[in-house]
Amino acid sequence: MGIAAELGVVDHEFVIDTATVRAFVSDVKTTISAASSPEHACDMLRPRFAELLADPDWLPAEYQAAAPESGMGGGIGQWLLYRAADQSLSLFSLVVPSGSATPIHDHLAWGLVGLYRGEQDEEIYAQRDGTLELVERRGLLPGDFYALIPPRDDIHRVRTTSTETSVSIHLLTNDTGCVWRHAFDPASGEATPFRSGYVNVPCEDGE
């Protein structure tokens, strides 16, 4: 089965319904349909994703705002920008106030993640014999981005190190805010069911 068949994007939900976002999603679909693997798709998407991160005007301020009432804590807000109706593709912003950090978590999807605003420190973990091992720590500046190809590099935690709020853009092949993923205890490595949700759009069951 090819990547396009696996993805199965059949319909759309554009929260930001602009020419820029529609053109980006169209390019993503075309690129994925020509890819032979997730790795190949991510490689081909890199130039287009870099263009989106470099565009200062496409993301409205409301989707770069912290969310004090968010269930993720620390004012962290996850804002849906686009998703396929079959939940096989999503584009969203993750807003992390200065000094706040996400839980250690996975994504269970492949795609690209990049920093749009602010600065972050990222810690990448691997599961080893039921525990978590910190395998890499790196700093991220606006325009930096990376591929997620589970299980490699799929477990991480990010913390905003700049005085301004950080905003990262995620293009992932699931409905990340509404699928049940895992949060991990940093000491024991124990995984707990975790769903981040979206600030602006409910999941199908209303949560």
Image: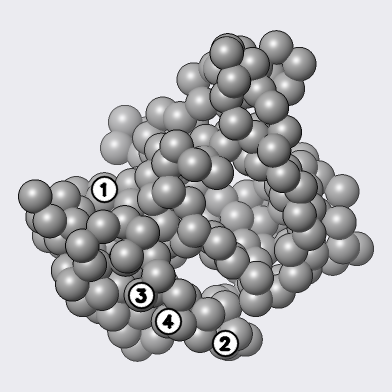
Q: Position of residue 1 (x, y in %)?
A: 8, 50
Q: Label 4, secondary structure: give it.
A: helix
> Between tags 3 and 2, which lies in front?
3
Asked whether disc 3 touches disc 2, contact meaning CB atoms under 8 Å apart, the reply is no
Would residue 20 be seen by someone viewing this image from the given angle? Answer: yes
| 88 relative to 74, above or below | below
Q: Position of residue 171 (x, y in %)?
A: 43, 61
Instruction: For label 2, count other residues whose C-alpha is less than 10 Å away and answer few (under 14), some (14-19) or many (20+).
Output: few
> Between tags 3 and 4, which lies in front?
3
Query: Which comes before the other along the chain, label 4 or label 1?
Result: 4
Query: Which comes before the other along the chain, label 4 or label 2?
Result: 4
Q: CA distance from mark 3 to mark 2?
A: 19 Å
Asked whether disc 3 touches disc 1, contact meaning CB atoms under 8 Å apart, the reply is no
Query: In the shown orientation, is residue 7 left or right of residue 76?
Result: left
Instruction: For label 4, count other residues whose C-alpha is less than 10 Å away and answer few (under 14), some (14-19) or many (20+).
Output: few
| 189 relative to 6, above or below | above
Report the residue marked by disc 1.
87
* Label placed on residue 55: 2
Circle 2: residue type: Asp
Q: Position of residue 129 (x, y in %)?
A: 57, 13
Q: Residue at x 32, y 66 (%)?
A: 41
Q: Position of residue 191 (x, y in %)?
A: 56, 17
Circle 1: residue type: Gln
Query: Which comes before the other along the chain, label 1 or label 2?
Result: 2
Circle 4: residue type: Arg
Q: Label 1, secondary structure: give it.
A: loop
* Label placed on residue 44: 3
